[in-house]
Image (cartoon, coloured by chain):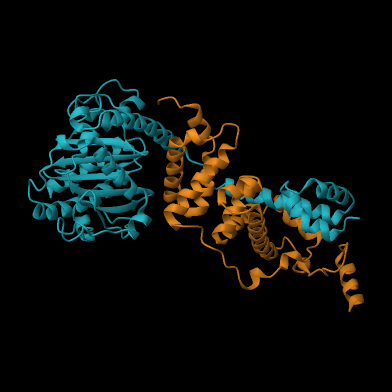
Chain colours: A cyan, B orange
């Protein structure tokens, strides 16, 4: 005879549908006769339903997030194809003559493909792509970026002589540049890990480490008081010989980088777009967008979850802010 | 937009599940979205390892959990140390049928939104490995075996975490229900564990206690 005590010890597993058959039959028989145990089972099931409803009503992905994930998957598929190319053409010079030499050819890249554009992306198309990020958000972001880059630019120009590294672009393997881009994206997406692995192996190259601009400077650049959270992630990217700083602004995490463009011409792996007198190089890595401007020996890049073209606009705005200042 | 492959479409079909678990793990919406993106990208790269016919959601959640552990914990989920009142087996005691009926049917009292908020708060307060077990079982409805694979622990450990996690949740919800007047204060009298059957009423329970004394 099955007792209430036994059923009570089984009821949770029974409600999960995991009670072994030999006990399940006994439990069924008992539950059919015992109101108290049946109520306990109903409660267990109601409890699960309540937990499920409480979580699901609070966790529905937004339409913009769904679209972002779609873009990430498509971009990852495109990146896989690029990697396949890299395996067959090991050097930059070899690949330069192929379809993945992006710098000068302005060819349609995966961005254009995903947007069903069969022409180069111009300033006009960039300006029409501002559906998801308002200027209200952009302005403080651009101001912060400009301040950060201004500061980094001053420091870098003081510390990095031209021709610091004699390695020419053609000697670099494309995979190295890819690894630099991956390093950037990894730094962006893993701020916690990043903060735990600060390396100072190149402090002689950039000294002191990249720092955030004083808050007042940000305001003086046209930004209003910023509702920004600035995590303490001033980090050296040892392999890239640069520095980064991460920001979280209204739900978007953005990481800015200053790096040695002479050593690591990342533009070779990105697609160039003319924008306000600059050439902004954009691309996607692991679903995140990368945008960089390389003028002289220093490159200024940013990674974010923003669409690539919005990232391009942001970095161009930041560069303009630096120039105006 | 470029068309999606079958695998990509299937994976995106589990977006809400991935986001729900990621949100409960990271407790930060921006980080949870990045965690989901990271998971999907890794799944794309490893899609050859997925065995068609098996549970894609469980496979994706396994990637998500491992990514979270590697990124934030660098080893394993934080071990839960539950002490004090929460460690006491209060839930093993008896709760009146009427109280359980009231608790399981909050819709009729128009208090469901408050209860849902309380559930989310209680879930957020759970130790991490309990929270994850409850999420995977009660929200994502995975089997013990699947949860065991995801968490990398024996099924017995899964059951233990589930039981303890749910017990903490239930206790908090009972307290909340009492405050809201859904159940009476007398609804969780301790039951005599030596007895074979439950009393059908509080009066019978009290008289039984009197006899045993």
Percent x, y for residue A266?
21, 39
With respect to residue A260, does A273 lie above or below? above
The residue lying at 31 percent from left, 32 percent from top is A129
Residue A80 appearing in the image: yes
Instruction: From the viewer's perspective, tell me whether residue B8 is left or right of residue A28.
Output: left
Number of numbered tags placed on the structure image? 0
With respect to residue B212, does A218 lie above or below? above
Percent x, y for residue A265?
18, 39
In the image, farthest residue toward the left = A162
Instruction: From the viewer's perspective, tell me whether residue B191 is left or right of residue B119.
Output: right
Instruction: From the viewer's perspective, tell me whether residue A65 is left or right of residue A32.
Output: left
The residue lying at 57 percent from left, 31 percent from top is B52
Is A5 or A62 nearer to us in this picture?
Answer: A5
The residue lying at 11 percent from left, 43 percent from top is A296
Q: Quadrant of the N terminus of chain A?
A: bottom right
Is A102 or A44 nearer to us in this picture?
Answer: A102
Percent x, y for residue A142?
25, 47
In the image, farthest residue toward the bottom = B213
Residue A53 appearing in the image: no
Percent x, y for residue A149?
19, 50
């Amino acid at each position: 005879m099955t007792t209430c005590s036994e059923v009570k010890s089984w009821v949770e597993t029974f409600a999960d549908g995991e009670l072994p058959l030999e006990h399940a039959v006994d439990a069924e028989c008992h539950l059919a006769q015992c109101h108290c145990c049946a109520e306990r089972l109903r409660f267990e099931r109601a409890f699960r339903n309540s937990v499920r409803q409480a979580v699901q009503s609070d966790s529905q992905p937004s339409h913009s997030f769904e679209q972002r994930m779609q873009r990430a998957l498509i971009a990852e598929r495109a990146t896989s194809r690029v990697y396949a190319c890299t395996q067959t053409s090991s050097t930059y010079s070899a690949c330069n003559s192929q379809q993945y030499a992006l710098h000068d050819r302005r060819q349609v890249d995966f961005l254009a493909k995903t947007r069903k554009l069969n022409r180069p992306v111009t300033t006009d198309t960039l300006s029409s792509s501002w559906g998801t990020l308002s200027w209200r958000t952009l302005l403080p972001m651009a101001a912060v970026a400009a301040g950060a880059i201004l500061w980094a630019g001053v420091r870098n120009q003081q510390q990095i002589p031209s021709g610091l590294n004699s390695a020419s672009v053609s000697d670099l393997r494309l995979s190295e540049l890819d690894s630099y881009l991956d390093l950037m994206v990894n730094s962006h997406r893993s701020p916690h890990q990043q903060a735990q692995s600060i390396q100072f192996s190149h402090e002689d190259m950039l000294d002191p480490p990249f720092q955030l601009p004083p808050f007042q400077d940000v305001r003086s650049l046209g930004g209003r008081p910023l509702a920004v959270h600035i995590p303490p992630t001033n980090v050296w990217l040892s392999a890239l010989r640069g520095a980064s700083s991460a920001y979280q602004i209204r739900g978007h995490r953005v990481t800015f980088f200053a790096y040695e463009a002479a050593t690591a011409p990342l533009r070779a792996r990105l697609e160039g777009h003319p924008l306000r007198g600059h050439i902004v190089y954009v691309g996607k890595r692991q679903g995140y967008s990368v945008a960089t401007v390389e003028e002289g020996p220093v490159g200024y890049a940013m990674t974010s979850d923003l669409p690539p073209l919005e990232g391009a606009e942001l970095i161009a705005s930041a560069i303009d802010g630096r120039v105006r200042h | 937009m470029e068309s999606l492959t079958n695998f990509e479409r299937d994976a995106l079909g589990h977006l809400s599940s991935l986001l729900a678990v990621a949100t409960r793990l990271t407790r930060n919406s921006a980080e949870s979205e990045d965690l989901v993106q990271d998971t999907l990208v890794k799944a794309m790269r490893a899609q050859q390892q997925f065995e068609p016919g098996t549970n894609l959601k469980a496979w994706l959640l396994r990637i998500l959990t491992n990514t979270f552990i590697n990124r934030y914990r660098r080893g394993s989920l934080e071990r839960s140390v539950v002490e004090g009142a929460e460690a006491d087996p209060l839930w093993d005691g008896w709760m009146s049928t009427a109280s359980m009926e009231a608790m399981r049917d909050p819709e009729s009292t128009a208090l469901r939104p408050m209860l849902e908020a309380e559930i989310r708060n209680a879930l957020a307060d759970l130790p991490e490995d309990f929270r994850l077990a409850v999420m995977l079982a009660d929200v994502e409805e995975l089997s013990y075996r699947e949860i065991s694979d995801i968490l990398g622990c024996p099924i017995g450990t899964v059951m233990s975490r589930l039981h303890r996690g749910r017990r903490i949740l239930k206790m908090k919800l009972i307290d909340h229900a009492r405050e809201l007047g859904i159940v009476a204060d007398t609804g969780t009298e301790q039951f005599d564990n030596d007895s074979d059957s439950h009393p059908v009423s509080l009066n019978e329970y009290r008289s039984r206690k009197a006899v045993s004394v």
